[in-house]
Amino acid sequence: MRVGLISGGNIQSDFALSFLEEQKYDRIIAADRGLHFCYKHGIVPQAVVGDFDSMPQGILEEYEGRPGTVVHRLSPRKDDSDTQSAFHIAVEMGASEIGILGGTGGRLDHTLANVELLACGLSAGVHSYMADAWNYIWASQRPVRLRRSMQKGKYVSLFALGGPVEGLTLKGFSYPLDHYRLTSRDCGLTVSNEIVEEEAVITFTKGCLLLIMSRDC
């Protein structure tokens, strides 16, 4: 089951609506202020999650008691963010894929927490990613093949997530690597690379790799 999770970060409406139409998710979950986006654009989520402390008055009431929509009210004093709670609910629903909109922009602490969710998705066996008008972000513990024709944006950047990435080898890129040990200190080495062949291949022997395909704003 493919789940679209709409969170409360900055959402570029034209992009998000086009992305949702393209993806055709089986279920939609709105996390807190993400419900405001749904309300403005006539989207009816199957689940609504949050403490709703930043929700304009009257919007939540439009969805409470509505058939097919389950509202999960959270305490403002909690261990997980609203997006994290929504992500875990999506996993409990049986999601095999979770795409997050509104997971970037706004507060940097929330964006970083959402990036960590991508690693949680790997642990749960769920393919998860974040997308906005300029970035497509996901994590992998396995080799990755990127076809130039399917690239989202001009640049590909790589980061070690949660620890070193061993034996990193890049082929088909403007800046190749051969069995490199990538750590969090290699801030600039693997940023803004470009695919120069029809297919680029990323391999590594150990670790978790954060991948970002991006375009200039």
Image (cartoon, rainbow, N blue to C red):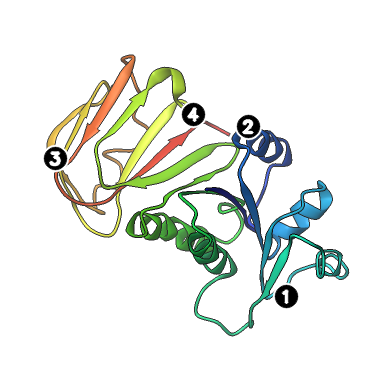
Residue 55 locus on image (x, y percent): 77, 68
Q: Amino acid at mark 3?
A: Tyr
Q: Earlier in the sequence, mark 2 or mark 3?
A: 2
User: x, y percentage for residue 126?
Assistant: 41, 52
The first of marks 4 and 2 along the sequence is 2
Q: CA distance from mark 3 to mark 4?
A: 25 Å
Disc 4 residue crowd, few under 14, some 14–19, many 20+, Cα 10 Å: some
Residue beneath disc 3:
180
Instruction: Tell whether 112 sits left or right of 103.
Output: left
The answer to whether one can see residue 194 in this image is: no
Where does label 4 land, which residue?
152
3D distance between C-alphas at marks 3 and 1: 46 Å
Where in the figure is residue 177, as x and y percent of width and height? 17, 31
Which tag, 3 or 1, sits closer to the chain's start? 1
**Distance Cα–Cα, label 4 vs label 1:** 34 Å
Amino acid type indicated by mark 2 = Glu
Front tag of 2 and 3: 2
Label 4: which secondary element: loop
Residue located beneath label 2 in the image = 22
Element type at mark 1: loop
Query: Mark 4 or mark 1: which comes first in sequence?
Result: 1
Question: Where does the image place residue 104, in percent across and percent down from the top left?
Answer: 56, 52
The kind of secondary structure element at disc 3 is strand
Q: Which residue is mark 1?
A: 53
